[in-house]
Amino acid sequence: MSRPAADEDGGATCRQCPRFVPACSNFSIQYNYSSASIAAAIMLSHNDTIGVGVRPDFPQPKWVAHGLLGAVFIGSVAGMLTMGYLGDVLGVRPALIVTNALAAFGALASSLLSWGSPETIWTMIAVSRLVMGIGVGGNYPLSAAKAAQPGKGAREVSAVDAANSAAKAFFWQGPGQLAPYLLALPLLSLPPSQGITSVQFRILLGIGAIPALVVLLCSIYEEEHHSVARTPGRGNLGDPRNWQLLVGTAGCWFLFDIAFYGTVIFSPEILLKVFGKTESLTSLAVHAAATILVTILGNGASLMALRWMGARTLNTAGFVASCLAFCAFGLAYASRRDEHVLQYVLLCIVNLALSMNNISTFMLPVLAFPHSVRSTFHGISAAAAKLGAMVGTVLFPAPCAQRGEVGSGAAP
């Protein structure tokens, strides 16, 4: 192939990046958030067996119960606040390069650098996910800003068109959330052998570096060959109206993420409580994947509903539907403990109801703020959301006996 032809192919690839980069960024976000849940479940298993009376291959220290899953959100808050601002000051592409380099490094470190005693392994994973959280968190405001950028030759897009583009990119968080559980199924089918648990959880965590590296490389290539259409700047951060709007966008997202991540991150443990001793690690992965598939279908339906009801109305309807769904599931769990199928169906309905808020909360900052400060205020809104996610991880109880904690007295 001649050099001019190669440059032409590169330019064609570059023109697709405005659509591909935000989608891949959102896929990376939820893969890396969700992978730790199933990876931790595998680490706490032995030969596909989990629950009370099973001695886990990697016993947890007591602090891991909430610390591991919360560490990524602590990093995310920092990433959302700093990377969103960098996106407005330096430009979206340079900020994307930095944030995805951190995400890829954190994912690889959690997989390749976590060796030694169980205490050391869990500690290294937690530290790595803190770093990864900074990178993944930065993708929230930057992917929205990237999706909302005008196409080649265009000078500006309306707030509604920008929000719709961001929503289409956000849809790929659903497949990203599903991917770790689908990957876990063939890994769990591997024949039992010495060290197989280590191989399984390291693959699950390490694979998260791939979408981050793809975004990183595409951003580097696009930076080199395709200059940014708008000039980055600080914008009017001091406008009091923007800070008033922030109360609404950040508050809605904060409340939503308490419910969403309190459900999603602890999905393996919720399913263990629903199905009890009959749940194997493989069946847990299948049931979790099915609930996430319901969420993806709900996200798709929400995208279509946005055309005729708008993000604000959909967001309000989603909060009402989620409240009713959680109440129904709570009542069934409290009064119908032996009706596992009923509880599971209601749990799927909870996930379906949450999907009504999932896209609309992401869109609201894009609709509310001008493009010159959109990354900054989207980042602050997303940071408030991850504070809500941390609240969700603290509220969920974690019985020591089921977690196989170091020093918990779990049966051998």
Image (cartoon, rainbow, N blue to C red):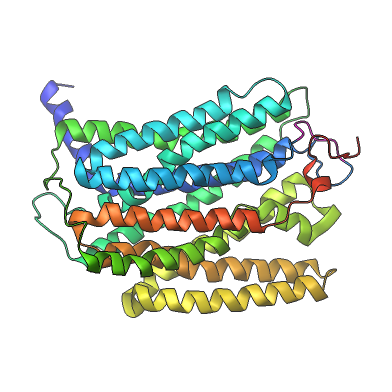
Q: Which residue is drawn at 25% across and 56% down?
A: 374
Q: How many labels does the image show?
A: 0
Q: Residue at x 54, y 77 (%)?
A: 321
Left or right of residue 174, residue 236 in this image: left
* Magenta highlight: main SS: loop
Question: Where is residue 237 drawn, in percent x and y?
Answer: 21, 56
Q: In which quarter of the image is residue 330?
A: bottom right
First to last magenta residue range: 54-59
Question: Where is residue 158 drawn, in percent x and y?
Answer: 17, 65
Q: Nearer the viewer, residue 221 or 247?
A: 247
Q: Residue at x 79, y 59 (%)?
A: 275
Q: Residue at x 12, y 48 (%)?
A: 230
Q: Which of 18 and 92 is in front in this view?
A: 92
**Can residue 208 be seen?**
no
Left or right of residue 33, residue 13 in this image: left
Q: Nearer the viewer, residue 291 or 354?
A: 354
Question: Where is residue 410 drawn, in percent x and y?
Answer: 87, 40
Q: Quadrant of the C terminus?
A: top right
- Vertical comparison of 116 with 328: above or below: above
- Vertical comparison of 327 with 63: above or below: below
Question: Where is residue 5 drawn, in percent x and y?
Answer: 14, 28
**Can residue 198 be seen?**
yes
Q: In which quarter of the image is the N terminus?
A: top left
Q: In which quarter of the image is residue 110?
A: top right
Asked whether residue 57 is drawn in magenta, I would say: yes
Asked whether residue 71 is drawn in magenta, I would say: no
